[in-house]
Structures are given as structure tokens and as C-alpha cells.
Amino acid sequence: MESQLFNRCKPYIAMISLQFGYAGMNIITKVSLNHGMSHYVLVVYRHAFATLSIAPFALILERKVRPKITVPLFMQIFVLGLLGPVIDQNFYYAGLKLTSPTFSCAMSNILPAMTFVMAVIFRMEKINIKKVIYQAKVVGTVVTVAGAMLMTLYKGPLVELVWTKHAHAHQAALPISSSSADKDWFLGCICLIVATLAWASLFILQTHTLKSFSSAPLSLTSLICFMGTLQATAVTLVMEHKPSVWKIGFDMNLLAAAYAGIVTSSIAYYVQGLVIQQRGPVFASAFSPLMMIIVAIMGSFILSENMYLGGILGSILIVGGLYSVLWGKYREDKEKKEMERMVLPLALKIMDIVEVDEVELEKIKANNKISSSMEQGVIKIIAPKPEI
């Protein structure tokens, strides 16, 4: 009984633990960026750590099922590395540096809605607006976008928490230009939206690429991280001209790169894959707002993070829209499974009918043969013998 209860709780425990892991990454990364680490260099080191931690498992476990790398497949991996490690991560870290961890997590919740819009554009999703499930997805997408726009365009007054009043009073005494801070905040919002758009594009392309790597997902992840490391290195060499930016010691910068690479790009990928395989992608996505709450609490304690009314209202809209999209997706998947269950018994019934008809036909043929042979025997008995 206890083992069954634990097995049922395992997906919940795994996803809640992952949200704490993601929250820790946001806080540690923010501290590292505040201490002057270049986000370009951080992306390089993060994916170098990710490649080193995933590649050995991919080489050992998937050596017999790994597909041959053709030119079209290589180009897909190249674009995936560009979308994920380079564009998404660099813009996300830039947005995180200019805003706050809680704000960045809230903006990342628009990912399901943005992915849905792109899937419709590329005809990977069909919409029947007469059905409630599609209405929920469309309304959820609109509400999510509205929340993101509210967070971007309206900052609002500062919301003080009991344990952050002293820190806010100290910050208020410091001479900070309001117009400069608002400009940085707006620029950070744009960076986060671009990052989310790149991540949604990666999901769309990865859906196609995974068809070739259906038996070797670790190999695909390793190749994307390795390609991203090379591309991010090239971008960093163009954007950062001082050799000193590459220096890293046993400090917060090393912790940020190693933590992000090993925990959020390796362990999280494996655990999330297991949960998705067991409970589906909608179940896994439903826990993402929890990360925002954890980051808000941790950020207010550790970083004395400022929280503004616009961010809170926008976050509420985004979470509401997110669950509307996820509910629509859940109902859609459930309907598809029910249709498959209905089609299978119907097909089996048709096969049974065909088999019964074939058996009956054989019986009729056999009866006809017996009848014809009996008729021939009767004819022979009745027929007069010829006179000699």
C-alpha cells in the first residue's frame, strides 16, 4: 500500500523538486550576473558543462541506435543550437540581468501559448473554434499575451513585503535615475519575449528532428549542446574583446555555470523526460508557475528583490492563460485517446465479422459439396441398369 502511494507521488515529487532546481538556477545566475559575469561567457560554460555531463551517457547507451548524420539533419541541429543555447539563453540572461528573477520566470510562462500560435502558423495544430477546447486555447493565448504586454508596458507602484521594507528603505536612499531604470526594465522585457520566441521555435523544429532521433534523444541533446557551445563561443569572441572575461575561479561564476549546465540542462532533462513519458507533457507544464512563486519568495529574501504591481497583475493573467491553454490541450489529447479506443474495438469487430463470414462461407461450400455428392449417389441408385 505504501509503495503504491509512493509510486503515485513520484511524478509530483519529481516535478516539485525540478521547480526548486530551476528556481535555484535563476537566483544563482542573477547573483553571478550582478557580480559582473558576462552572460555570453556564462552561456558558453553552461553548455560546455551540459555537453560533458550528457555526452558520455549518449555514447554508451545509444551507440547502436544513433542515426546517421546527413546534411539536412546536420543543418537542423545547427539551427537548434542557434535557437536554444545562443539566442534563447543569451536574451534570457540579458533580460534576467535587466529585470529580476521573478519577472523572468513569469514571462517564461508565455511559452506554451507562443508555441501554440507557432504550431497553428505552421499547420501543426488545427483549430475548430466551435469546440470548447479550442476556444479555451485561443482565449488562454490572448490572456497570456495580454499579461505579458501588461508586465512590459506597466510597471506600477512598488509592492512592499514585511521582510523587505528595510531593504527598500535603504535602496530608496540611493540616487538612481528613474528614467534609466524604466528604460532598462522595458529593454529587459523585450529580451525575455525574444528568448521565449526562440525557445518556442526550437520546440517546433525539434518536433520534426526528433522523428530521426526517436530512439536516441540523449544523442540529440548532446549534439545541440555541443553545437550551441561552439556557436556561443563564436558569438562571445565577437561581442567580448577582453580576454579577462573568460577567467573563472572557484566562485559564484563557476557555480552558476556548473549548476545551470549539470542540474537544469542534464538532470532536469532526464527527470522531465521520465515524467512526460509517464504522465504526459501537460502534467509537466502545469508545474511551471510554482517556480515563479518559489523564485519570488527566494528572491525577496536573498536578493531583496523589488516587486511591482504591474508584474503581479501580469503574472496572474499569464498563469490564468497558461492553465486555460493547458486545459484545452489536455482535453484535446483525451479526446484523441478516446477516439483511438473507439476505433480499435470497431476494427476488431469488423475483422471478427469478416472471419465469421469466411467460416460461414466455408460451411456453405462444404454443405453444397455434400449435397451434390448425395444427389449424384441417388441418381446412380435410381438410374436403370443397361440391358445386356
Image (spheres, rainbow, N blue to C red):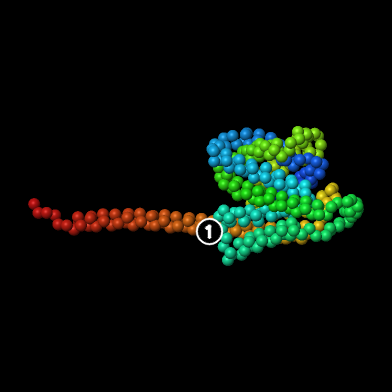
Q: Position of residue 232 (x, y in %)?
A: 68, 39
Q: Which residue lies furthest to the left in this view?
A: 388
Q: In this view, does 327 lie above or below 267?
A: below
Vertical arrangement, residue 324 with respect to residue 96, above or below:
below
Q: Which of 345 and 266 is in front in this view?
A: 266
Question: Residue at position x 74%, y 46% from top?
Answer: 94
Outermost bottom residue: 130
Give the amino acid at mark 1: Met
User: In the rendered view, would you say 40 is above or below 334?
Assistant: above
Q: In this view, does 232 lie to the left or right of 308?
A: left
| Residue 292 shows in this picture | no
Q: Mark 1 points at which residue?
A: 342
Residue 219 location, x and y as percent?
61, 38
SS at circle 1: helix
User: For mark 1, does the 10 Å Cα neighbourhood hold few (<14), some (14 to 19), or many (20 or more) residues?
Assistant: few
Q: Is residue 223 left or right of residue 19?
A: left
Could you tell me which residue is drawn at 58 percent across and 55 percent down?
121
Q: Quadrant of residue 218?
A: top right
The residue at the point 79 percent across, 43 percent down is 33
Where is residue 127 drawn, in percent x and y?
Answer: 57, 60
For the point 69% across and 52% down, the residue is 193
Taking 39 as reference, is 144 above or below it?
Answer: below
